[in-house]
Image (cartoon, rainbow, N blue to C red):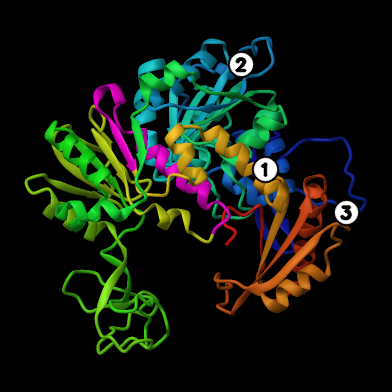
Amino acid sequence: MPGCRVRVRFAGKLLDGFVLERVEQSEHGGRLAYLERVVSPEVVLTPEIARLARTVADRWAGSLADVLRLAIPPRHATVEKRPPTGPDIAATSPPARGDTPLRQVREMLPGDWPRELASLAAGALADGRGVVVVVPDHRDLARLSRAVGDAVGADAYVALAADLGPAERYQRFLRISRGEVRCVVGTRGAVWAPVHQLGLVIVWDDGDDLYAEPRAPYCHTRDVAVARAHLADAGCILAGHAVTAEAAALVESRWARAVTPDKSQRSQALPAIRASGDDSDLARDPAARAARLPSLAWQATRDALAADLPVLVQVPRLGYQVSLQCAQCRAAARCAVCAGPLQRNTADATPVCRWCGAPATGWKCPQCSATSFRAGVVGAKRTAEELGRAFPGAPVRSSGGDHVLAEVTAGRQLVVATPGAEPVADGGYGAAVLLDGWALLGRDDLRAGEEALRRWLNAAALVRPAGAGGKVVVVAPGELRPVQALLRWRPGWHAARELEDRRALHLPPAARLAAVTGPAAAVTDLLAHCELPAVAEVLGPVPSPRRSSDEEPAERVLVRVPRRDAAQLATTLHAAAAVRSARKSPGAVRIELDPLVIA
């Protein structure tokens, strides 16, 4: 039966496979072999997911087998033997398609976004359609699951996450593939859930880097969701506090419609947001100097604590003193062994190298011969210490790294968090201080401005409205475009400007970019077998920070083409990789289309 698992003998080995379809005759002119056996009659590969997998493999220069490994979990025989636990929704006739599918890019204001997404999911189910909602991480999933359970009932949806055990994950997958449930919420892998009669796909915060698949063919959840909605003639909503350039491109092409809040909605929901990029006023307040807070941020923090409200302090990096400088000439402090950057893990600790771990005993500045240090970049741990001294009596809590808080209670406290690890406060924060904006904006990355704005908006969205006393202070120059977008809460405007810049620079999503990484000889060999489009630009090779699989030094080549030649680029790269695989050529080559990070 199409969609079931089988075992086949190929090149002398027994391999797993799936039946795609049954036909009267084969296109293959040679001899055919029998299937070794049918592993299970369970249909786990639906026609819709098979088409989607083929599309994703072609678009990202990958193989169908790699994509199916992402889409279908490993079999668990014991779970398959369990009887169905619900009605077979798949057996019912799908409702007639009405209006044009709902396709939107939604700018979300601060508020209860899980409830809003749950309402959209409930609407799709009420129309007799299936729905898939994808969020970046398990904390978002926990909040969304509670909201969806309240909206549609605990038995009407399934949650999929990477931390589920094999048996539990496969059991939930079977409930979906058998048509027992039509609503799925989950993290990255949930975008492949074989929901029957799909009517809507929702992706929350599509700019989060957790959506970038780390396994071949390195596809992005947002793009898979868009492709799935297009193939299934279903709705698609990209929702979030921030808007990506990729989402702006969908709006520009009229595939999706932008949904933005009006002036009255903004005034009711937004906190008061101000920028403070000038440190000259630090001299006015010694306590503010100790905590490296501009007076504007100091005042907002003090007012919130006085009102018995929690304060969120966002710090770009973990650690104590993440980067050290010479105290006299401010030159970067480097390791004498490998020239790596030095850091200090506690106030009294000996500085060590971030690269090789060697202690910097007896360090002397090569520029001025000074022997003392100053902090170049201060991490979350040191920031927590400074705030504890600056605001005595206020409890200080930290969230980041291996210790991430999901929620904090109401009341007077300081919460120091790294981007993405900000806990939700009961009733909202009274204030948020976004420190060291230069550290986010100054990253050597194509998406530095977009990512800084996304992190700021997500933190600001946790603060109560201005009418309830909520304030946000970002420590960054107010004239910069990402800061302006935050102050005005205009993520769509920023995304449109970002798209214009990318188009002028011939960068994704305005162009298609392939990163080919591996040992130098392997990269050269692969490109030699590529029939690249005539307009393709080959940039490089340059040394790559990524090591090859056999620990050889790696190099990277970028290949850039206009969007109209994207399919040809993916096809020729995949064909060249297949030739190398068939020849068993040495050296593994990684092919990424539109990589998330282009440093």
Q: Bin the neighbour count of mark 1 within 10 Å (Cα to Cα): few under 14, some 14-19, many 20 and up.
A: some
| Type of amino acid at the residue the image marks with label 2 | Ala
* Element carrying mark 3: loop
* Element carrying mark 2: helix
Dot 2 or dot 3: first in sequence order is: 3
Please provide percent x and percent y for residue 29. Answer: 93, 51
Magenta segment, which residues?
445-473
Instruction: Indicate whether residue 458 is drawn in magenta.
Output: yes
Dot 1 or dot 3: first in sequence order is: 3
Q: Which mark is residue 559?
A: none
Viewer-side residue, 68 vs 142: 142
Q: Is residue 548 left or right of residue 340?
A: right
Disc 2 designates what residue?
91
Asked if the residue under mark 3 is in contact with the one under mark 1, i.e. CB atoms within 8 Å, the reply is: no
Query: Looking at the image, which residue is at 47% across and 45% down?
Result: 479
Q: Is residue 373 left or right of residue 444?
A: left
Calculate the distance from the C-alpha at mark 2 to the C-alpha at mark 3: 38 Å
| Type of amino acid at the residue the image marks with label 3 | Arg
Calculate the distance from the C-alpha at mark 1 to the C-alpha at mark 3: 55 Å
Disc 3 designates what residue?
31
Judge depth for marks 2 and 3 and give the one in front: 2
User: Considering only vertical position in the picture, is 527 above or below 422?
Assistant: below
Judge depth for marks 2 and 1 and give the one in front: 1
Viewer-side residue, 505 vs 157: 505
Quarter containing the C terminus: bottom right
Disc 1 designates what residue?
500
User: Considering only vertical position in the picture, is 228 above or below 435?
Assistant: above
| Type of amino acid at the residue the image marks with label 1 | Glu
User: Considering only vertical position in the picture, is 310 above or below 351?
Assistant: above
Query: Looking at the image, which residue is at 38% across and 81% down?
Result: 334
